[in-house]
Image: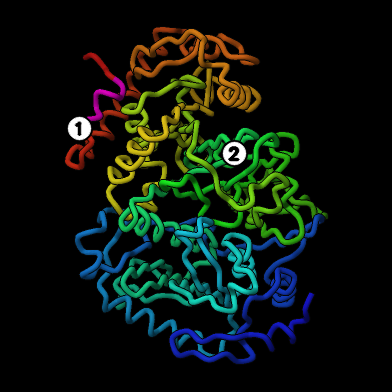
Amino acid sequence: MQSLTAQTATARFNYSGWTSDENTHYQCSPGSLIQFTLRNGQGVLNDTGALVVKTGRFTGRSPKDKFIVKDAYTENTIFWNEFNIPLDEKYFDEVYDQMMLFVQGKELWIRDAIVCADNANKLNIRVINDNAWSNLFVHNMFLKPTENELQYLEPEWLILQISTFKGIPETNGIRSENFCIINFSKKIILIGGTGYTGEIKKSMFTVLNFLLPHEKEILSMHCSANIGRDNDTALFFGLSGTGKTTLSADENRRLIGDDEHGWSDEGVFNFEGGCYAKCIHLDKEKEPQIYSAVRSGALVENVTFVDGTDIIDFGSSQITENTRVSYPINFVPNAATPSLGDHPKNIFLLTCDAHGILPPVSRLDIKQAMYYFLSGYTAKVAGTEDGIREPVSTFSSCFGAPFLPLSPFTYAALLENRLLSSKARVWLINTGWTGGPYGIGKRISLKHTRAVIKAIFTNQLDEVEYQTHPIFGMAFPLTCPDVPARILNPQNTWPDGELYLLKAKELALKFIENFDKHQDHGYAMLKSSGPVVKI
């Protein structure tokens, strides 16, 4: 590991008229970034050598504080809504100038990196942080240029993340002191007032969710992906807590990536070079790949330790439920190199249905796939947020509404085209509750969910008998290897079958109500592919 002095001496910075000095550190090694963090008293090491930090006031994203500059380029292209909040150009310029002045003379860490593993779609970025551990996150999460690439790399986008800079709501046109502002015309992202590293990755994800579909008709996706021994690619869509990372981490398959991908005419490619896994209740037996990745070079956020030790208490939510670990994808023993895959053979839409209504596995036709993709359903359960005592249905278009700058139907139309050309099979997988809702039933066993996925990969569900759900309309198998037949039909698991149907209708009405909100954006033609409730 190079010394801090040596790293400082090799620093260079030439963006927007700045010049390098003794306070700017360029392209530091992970070891140096860890030493900087320890030196500055901003983190500690756990018993396996991972760096443990606290991100401060924010332990998650703040979607109401994400803005997109509204100008001639974006005015008629962005799908303006509660997630894509417009900001006047003059406010961006003010905040940018204020941040430039604020960082003069301050210690900064600069990293050049790449997004998109597909050579035809690579995008060079430069990220500037005001703390070393955030720069370690960037090292872990984005693709790393080779020495030769670095020599000639020309950054196309700049991400300036200064956690100690606070905006001025009264004059900056923003809502609070923290913010994330994306300027597509100037190709700059400004992040201030927050140390939560997820803002860095998700802001770049938002950029790619605009550029790839809008300019290249490439489907950008909030999903994980892996590939089997026969080069059969699988995609796993899902919101937080549905099993996207866990189910794609399969020792019998190579991991392409755990969160963000593109699907082009050539196949699937990862946007990132690392993984950002939730680690609340992380279990060595259930999630061995993630557990073993918590080692030197990994960055663990907002966890606490077992009293009197340096052992992480993964069961503790003392700081937040959203505890996280980031690590380079090569920490996963069977990661695909490069992070590319062929057109997918199977696509899984994951939902954690805390109402206990949806079957553990269902087969969808193309129109149903678009319906449930646009719905993006899961459920929050008691304990995840203050005041929640009953399961709360959540709908997030395309399983990633906060990161979609274009109309959700744009992504759904691209998905339909890909499904038609690839003949991929689509499955709805419920990783939530069975036998009743949260508090009465129980969580579907991870062992059974993995058995379902395995049966699909080995084509063992192709010839079995299926039944059509009386309300939601999807077909579910009546048998599956290594899964009790009784749980495949959720109505059979409830003590009262009539009560199940009543609650199923209640959930179906929520789907219908959510879909009706989008009837002006091309959704109406798909309503018949969703649940039907006869009044």
Residue 101 can be seen, yes or no: yes
Q: Residue at x 49, y 89 (%)?
A: 18
Residue placed most toward the observer, 316 or 466: 466
Any magenta on residue 333?
A: no
CA neighbours of label 2 inside 10 A, class few (<14), some (14 to 19), many (20+): many
Left or right placement of residue 330 versus residue 428 in this view: right
x then y, percent, for residue 154: 49, 77
Identify residue for label 2.
227
CA–CA distance in space, label 1 to label 2: 35 Å
Quarter of the rendering occupied by the N terminus: bottom right
Residue placed most toward the observer, 319 or 533: 533
At label 2, the amino acid type is Ile
Q: Are marks 1 and 2 in contact (CB under 8 Å)?
A: no
At label 1, the amino acid type is Ala
Q: Residue at x 37, y 35 (%)?
A: 421
x then y, percent, for residue 132: 64, 73
Quadrant position of residue 77 = bottom left
> Looking at the image, is mark 1 or mark 2 earlier in the sequence?
2
Identify residue for label 1.
524
Q: Secondary structure at mark 2?
A: strand
Part of the protein shown in magenta:
524-531
CA neighbours of label 1 inside 10 A, class few (<14), some (14 to 19), many (20+): few
Q: Residue at x 70, y 44 (%)?
A: 334
